[in-house]
Image: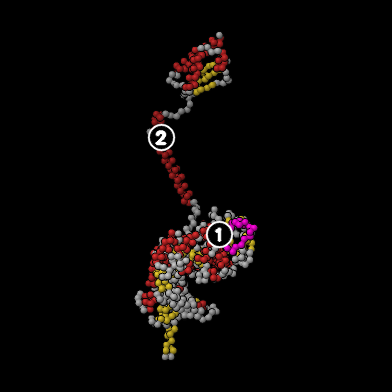
Amino acid sequence: MESGRDSGEANGEVKERSSSVVNTSESEEVSYENQQQQADVDMGKQNAEDLDESAQERMLQGDDTTAKITEKDNVEVKFISENGDVKIDMEQTKDTLAGMSKEELMKFANDPFWVKMRWALFILFWLLWAGMLAGAVAIIVMAPKCSAPELKKFWEESPIIQLDASIDSPSNDLKGLESVLNDLKVQHIKAISLSSLVEEGIDGATEDFKTIKAKLGNISDLESLIKVATEKDQQIFLELDPNHSSVEHPWFKQSVERQDPYTSYYVWADGITTSDGEKGRRSPPNNWLSVYGDSAWEWNEKRGQYYLHQFNKSQPDLNYNNPAVVKEFGDILIHWLKLGISGFRLASTSFLTEDPDLQDERESHLPVEINNYQSLIHVRTRDRPENAAILTSWQEMVRNETDGKGLFALQDDIGADILQVYNEKKRVIDLPQNSHFFTTANANINATVLRNSILQWLQITPWPAWNLNDKHPLRHRMPTDVADSITLMTMLLPGTPILRLNDVMSAKDAFEILSNARGGLTFLHGSMTSKVINGTVFVYARNWLRSGNPGYLVMYQTGDESATIDLSAMPRISEEVNVVAHSPNYIRDTEVVRTKLYSNKVPISPKSTLILTFVPKE
């Protein structure tokens, strides 16, 4: 039973060593308790009974490697296999690096050196933090900034549509215009200009600047219309002519009677009397002419003086050299603003003041007949610098009453030199216009003339009005299809088109698309480049350099023949362009894809307009 003896001795040796470990380390608990318990169970079995040889072999099988369990703290238990015997060895391990205890640290807490050190580090930390914060703020403040685009007025985003209630309303009055506002809302129209609203005489001159024509309705009807417009995010302007009234106006009648304060509300002057035999011969006070020819003076027998009329003799000029008259008309503007009107388009403002000394006009060198208006140079009666002060005072009234949002514009063309005088100290005239080339154009307008006229005015003012109708409607001067093309061509020009209702509704699908596009950043803030291609096609592009905004390209064929145009020379144009809209008379090749074209071969029909969009090249 040699093996049994060996087992017993081995067991005894295990017990002896275990006892030794316990005696030397009574205060320490053995970690990995489940493993230690398992080892105790195995050794107990060996002490209680003899293990057969096969069991011993199974217990001792394995590699000659050392199984190692690290106990808590610094006790290490090793199971060692040597020549079939199992030995357990427990060793004291080297102490590992440990931090100082709380008690030890507290010994240094109040040490003067460490107190100073802590305060120094604390202060240094916050100084560094403050420095980084200041640096970040400095970078933000000093870094170049992209300025936010200037907010545009609603009358810059939208075309202005002139409405005459007696013509454009289904019921020929103000109430009927409410349905028209619905149609204009679909077309993205935000600005409406009411014409011929105030009471007029047979001669078309104003009899009362504060009263609505009886056949159109009353003040309540106007207020109702304004309320409907406001609900639709639309604004209504009023067109007035401050230069003159009717001879039937109460002011004029009282002025004839020399009743104060109306005695000097109009321009009165004595005539020139020359001896002619027994009877004196009376003549006007000077050589001034009306715009229709003949003398600008008319004798009033009752007052015994001449009165000035630069238009018809039934339209006497108001005397704006009289401050009381300037204030009187300012009160008229306030009257309408308080009713909800959002601004004005004033007519005949170049005739407001005249030379108070009534000096003769100089003769011009034009080969025209005597008494023709063009035979004189009208420095005494037109575009006088004194007009600027009057318009400025009215503009300030409009701005104050509308919190700076109201429109103050003119219906007539204005010269660049006069505009400079008016806007010398501040911007007085919104939407200045010089649209003579539009208001007199027929279907044969030349592409080069068209481009040069547009660019010339854009150099003077960056955001003008483009009036297509004035006193001679566009559709009376050319066929409807050509009028549609020209209307659509103006829609994306920098500036605001002044249109009439039939201009909007004639090609309303295309018009709606372009009117909506006017609200985009490319249109409102983008640049414009233009060319004449093929000698007959006026082309302009709208780009905004900031990424993510599409470019627009508008082309109008002034010629009478179809053509294929190469647009690749236009700045930043892409190889492919997309069709956005076109005039009704645009005829496209049925083989061409309807929405995409190559920019180097774009077909264009006679007298038609095509609008494209593209992704601008960097």
Q: Is residue 68 visible?
A: yes
Mark 1, Cα crowd under 10 Å, few <14 / some 14-19 / many 20+, is many
Instruction: Measuring from the top left, give residue 368's x and y in whole percent.
Output: 54, 79
Which disc number belongs to residue 160? none
Return the residue at label 1. Answer: 542
Q: Is residue 460 visible?
A: no
The quadrant the N terminus occupies is top right
Pick the residue in front: 493 or 611.
611
Magenta segment's dominant SS is loop
Q: Position of residue 318 (x, y in %)?
A: 41, 74
Q: Secondary structure at mark 2?
A: helix
Q: Where does the image place residue 218, in percent across and percent down from the top left?
A: 40, 67
Q: Position of residue 575 (x, y in %)?
A: 62, 55
**Residue occupying the point 48% across, 17% down:** 40
Res. 309 image quadrant: bottom left
Q: Is residue 306 above or below residue 518?
A: below
Q: Secondary structure at mark 1?
A: strand
Q: Which residues are magenta?
A: 577-597
Q: Residue at x 49, y 19 (%)?
A: 38
| Residue ID for mark 2 | 114
